[in-house]
Image (spheres, helix red, strand yellow):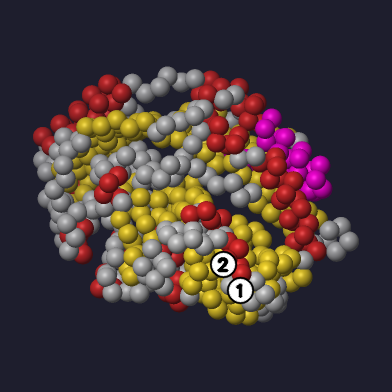
Amino acid sequence: MTIAQNPEAARQAASLPRLDRARLAELAEAALTAATRAGASYADIRIGETRRQFVQAKEERLDEFFESSSPGFGLRVLVDGCWGFYGARALEPGAMAAAAERAIHNARAVAPIRVAPVRLEETEPHEAEWIMPLGIDPFAVDAPEKVRRLIEVNAAALAAGADYCVSSFSFATEERLFADSRGSRIFQSRTRAQPSFEVTVIDKGSGRYATRESLAPARAAGWDYALSCDLIGEAARAVEDARRKLDARPVEAGVTDVVIDPTNLWLTIHETVGHSTELDRALGWEANFAGTSFVKPHMLNTLRFGSELMTILADRSQEGGLASVAFDDDGAPRERAEFEIVSKGVFRNYQMALGQAHLIGAERSNGCAYADDTTAFPIQRMPNISLAPNPDRCSLEELIGGVEKGLYIVGAGSWSIDQQRDNFQFGGQMFYEIRDGKLGEPVRDAAYQGRTISFWNSLDGLGDSSTYRLCGSFTCGKAEPMQLAPVSHGAPAARFRDVTVLNTAREV
Ligand SMILES: [Zn+2]
């Protein structure tokens, strides 16, 4: 791993040679051959490199610069129905034979505590190469240029009256070869970008302060996307929003109707639907790290998850989707990951990785595996998971027009949810009053809470595609040791009735 803590070293790191794919293929071949010769009934390997960069500026200065380049491989073997795994950084032939030995040793070591043998479904081999269409490679852009752009954002915020502004760019590129003992050889390359800032405005008289974070979403995209987000323009608007929050009346706690913007709703979808419908959680395998789920396998095709308006789609094909890729880390093609998790309100499908499908009587996995590094064991992770927009015309104004008294919620804020993915509480960047179908002034100190099933069943208004937006996160955490996955969630604006709204500043 090479790590650069300053821009000069980063320039050198960015000019490292691209991966030699023929060499990766040779190493993969060596590892798989060694594994199968030593007794593995199945073996697969992810081998390649992940590059990451994080640049942060506070006011007029560079605050943090980090760049890493992490080559590596992870070999997974199946021996007598037990998984064994070994991952390392060294990309050399000697390491492959040693890895096969260690992975098989690990599989045999867990055999005495095996509950049931791992059973793999049939998979067809794929030979493919998928390079994500990319505008400007962010790693080819000089670090000083990135710092200059961030300082411009901060300057715009300060000029508009902010007391503080911190802004950042995060970038990552994954280049990875997947190969398995059934003949798959898949090389993929993808890049993602997350532009972000937060402004703070202080009321010197009262000592109170308000913040507003940027709404520009993380995307699978390059430097050109980061530039297109107009952070400078948004910074001035964010300062105005923060000032309005400072002057705003406290929210009136109680039960009320809410219209939720996709910039907020994506996180609610992630926590309540995305995580609750992961099969490993439902089976109790994933319990330690805020795991498990209230959505049990016997609820398949019967649980009324939400109202008729609720259809939740999984995919790996939305342009800009952080989980968009041609094959998952089990080598399953993206077509497999096109499915409905919830269909017109009814729970229809779990997300599954290789070897899980038969546990609920399904034929095969639906392409939901990801390893956050080549050296990590691939686990079940979310594809893009989105709320389908209303096929009938419905604008944001119409949704708001249907509310006598309520709130319009914009931007993701704080969040909390129990390990069963049931009881939740979400904040937001802006809460605006709605009165008699008209948008009013912002209120402050608001959050909404509820329980997953009753919340989604209170969905009674859904915006059409004109209100749809794809948002998401670089860093969905799961498992121990924790793995961080990028994932996008699209949503239209949506209206929910009788939602409990809290005043978070009121003393309990
Ligand atoms: Zn998550």
The answer to whether residue 405 is above or below residue 398 is below
The yes-or-no answer for disc 1 within 8 Å of ligand 1 is: no
Which residue lies at the image location 38% right of the left edge and 61% below the top edge? 312
Which residue lies at the image location 32% right of the left edge and 39% below the top edge? 326
Q: Quadrant of the C terminus?
A: bottom right
Q: Is residue 416 visible?
A: no
The answer to whether residue 324 is above or below residue 33 is below
Q: Which residue is mark 1?
A: 403
The answer to whether residue 273 is above or below residue 506 is above
The answer to whether residue 323 is above or below residue 252 is above
Which residue lies at the image location 65% right of the left edge and 76% below the top edge? 405
Residue 42 percent coordinates (x, y)? 15, 43
The yes-or-no answer for disc 2 within 8 Å of ligand 1 is: no
Which sits in the foreground, 257 or 173? 257
Residue 390 percent coordinates (x, y)? 45, 61
Residue 376 percent coordinates (x, y)? 35, 43
Q: Quadrant of residue 285?
A: bottom left
Determine whether the residue tagged by mark 1 lies in a helix, strand or loop.
loop
Residue 399 percent coordinates (x, y)? 56, 67
Contact, mark 1 vs mark 2 (Cβ under 8 Å): yes
